[in-house]
Amino acid sequence: MENNNTIDSNVANSENEIASYVDISNGSENSSTNFSNGMSIDSMALSEYFEVVKNEYEIERNKKVSFENRAGIFLALVGTLGTFLFDRVQIKGIIHLLSIPLTFGILMKIVSCFLVYLSLAFTMFYLIKTITVKQHHNFEVRNIDEVLLTENRINALARIIFTYRDIICQHRQVNENRAKTFRRSLYGVIVMLVATIIYVSL
């Protein structure tokens, strides 16, 4: 529902922007606008911008798929690594260390053990968040009706360009958030590996 409302809002915004160029109410071109003076669609840049938004849309969609695939692979690897860690880095060993006189080496071992588990949870959280981040908006095909099908081609192309411009901006913002969460999960993996090495070596 939120997705549909956003797309409806994008379409409404697009109509307002188109209205600043074309007199939509009577279906005729305004002589004072950029779409006037007898210019044909072939002599305008609409087709070029339409190709631009199509390409940018595909790029952002591919980024989404790439983040989801990488996060899925890392999630499987971290899950496998977690099985190994549960066997080598055991909580009961730390409980035993807490019952003996504390030295610097024992303190480092205790801290590294907690870091292993904390970083594992941290990594899993951000990998899952990378996959389940906010949904990408799409062009709402249910908005296509008889009115849109009968409008002139210039209006239609302008409407599509403006709508996809807004969709692409939303995709970019979501993908930037995906990049941040994925980067944090990588930091978690690094901390987990370093903590594991310290724990095993002590």
Image: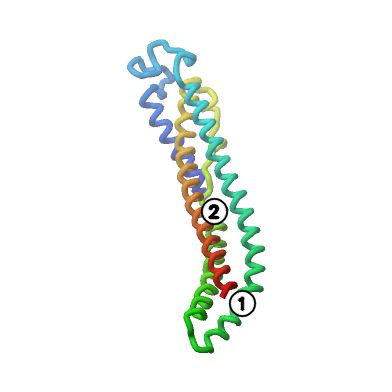
Q: Is residue 120 above or below residue 60?
A: below
Q: In this view, does 51 lie above or below 200?
A: above
Residue at 59% from the left image edge and 53% from the top image edge: 71
Query: The residue tagged with tag 1: helix, strand or loop?
Result: loop
Which percent across, then down, holds residue 118?
52, 69
Colour scheme of the picture: rainbow
The answer to whether residue 140 of the structure is visible from this angle is yes
Earlier-in-chain disc, 1 versus 2: 1
Mark 2 crowd level (few <14, some 14–19, many ≥20, 10 Å Cα): many
The answer to whether residue 156 of the structure is visible from this angle is no
Q: Is residue 43 left or right of residue 141?
A: left
Which percent across, then down, holds residue 169?
45, 39
Q: Which amino acid does label 2 sit on?
A: Thr
> Toward the viewer: 51 or 155?
51
Residue 79 picture quarter: bottom right
Q: Is residue 104 above or below residue 19?
A: below
User: Which tag is nearer the camera, tag 1 or tag 2?
Assistant: 1
Q: What residue type is labelled 1?
A: Gln
> Toward the viewer: 110 or 165?
110
Q: In this view, does 77 lie to the left or right of 138?
A: right
Q: Mark 2 points at which residue?
A: 130
Instruction: Return the residue found at the far left.
Output: 32
Residue at 62% from the left image edge and 61% from the top image edge: 78
Mark 1 crowd level (few <14, some 14–19, many ≥20, 10 Å Cα): few
Quarter of the image with the C terminus is bottom right
Residue at 35% from the left image edge and 15% from the top image edge: 31
Which percent across, then down, holds residue 108?
50, 76
Q: Residue 4 carries which label?
A: none
For the residues labelled 1 and 2, the Cα–Cα distance comes to: 29 Å
Query: The residue tagged with tag 2: helix, strand or loop?
Result: helix
Which percent across, then down, holds residue 73?
64, 53
Q: Residue 90 carries which label?
A: 1
